[in-house]
Every structure is written in structure tokens, then in C-alpha cells.
Amino acid sequence: MFGLGTQELVIILVLVLIVFGAGKLPQVGGALGKGLRNFKKGMGDGEDDIEDAQVVDKIEPKKDEKEDKQS
């Protein structure tokens, strides 16, 4: 996991605990989880938009392509 060993993770956890305190830790974790969920949702929506655009291009050629075919 990102090349971090057990000692590094423990040190990071202790620093986070000192900075935010034990009471705020659940709120920080919840905010981090919501942020990750929104990021994944946004990535999924972007992929859906790309797929929709590709399907529309296959069904309806662009105006320039229509003019080229008529000439």
C-alpha cells in the first residue's frame, strides 16, 4: 500500500490523533469516506457520459460528415 510499512502507518495514525483529537476522528473519517464516494460516483458518471457520446456519434453522424456524403 503506497510502499508504507507498519511503523510509518502507526506514526501517521498517532500524528492524526494528536492533530485532530480522539473526538474529531470519526468526523474526519466520515468526511473522507464521503469524499471518496463522491469521487468514485463522479468518475462513473464521466464514463457513462463518454459511452453515451460514442453511441450518439455512431447513430447520428456529425453535420460535416452528412455534407461530405451528399457531395
Image (spheres, rainbow, N blue to C red):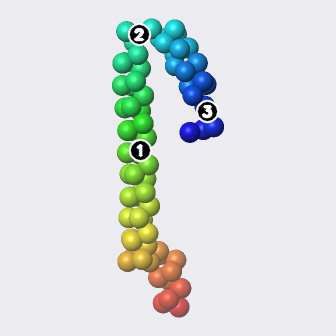
Q: Which mark lies nearer to you, 3 or 2?
A: 3
Asked whether disc 3 touches disc 2, contact meaning CB atoms under 8 Å apart, the reply is no
Q: Which mark is residue 56?
A: none
Q: Whole-percent x and y of residue 29?
A: 40, 24
Numbered disc 2: secondary structure: helix
Q: In the visual, does 7 lie left or right of 45?
A: right
Q: Which residue is mark 3?
A: 4
Q: Which residue is mark 1?
A: 40
Residue at 61%, 33% (x, y): give it: 4
Say which quarter of the image contains residue 7: top right
Q: Nearer the viewer, residue 24 or 12?
A: 12
User: Label 2, label 1: how many angstroms apart (C-alpha)?
Assistant: 28 Å
User: Label 1, label 3: how many angstroms apart (C-alpha)?
Assistant: 24 Å
- Is residue 47 depicted above or below 32 in this figure? below
* Lower position in the chain sequence, tag 1 or tag 3: 3
Q: Which residue is mark 2?
A: 22
Numbered disc 3: secondary structure: loop
Which residue type carries mark 2?
Answer: Ala
* Lower position in the chain sequence, tag 2 or tag 1: 2
Q: Which mark lies nearer to you, 2 or 1?
A: 2
Q: Nearer the viewer, residue 71 or 6?
A: 6
Residue at 38%, 64% (x, y): give it: 52
Quarter in which the N terminus is drawn: top right
- Is residue 63 depicted above or below 69 in this figure? above
Q: Residue furthest front?
A: 6
Residue at 41%, 20% (x, y): give it: 28
Q: Residue furthest right?
A: 3
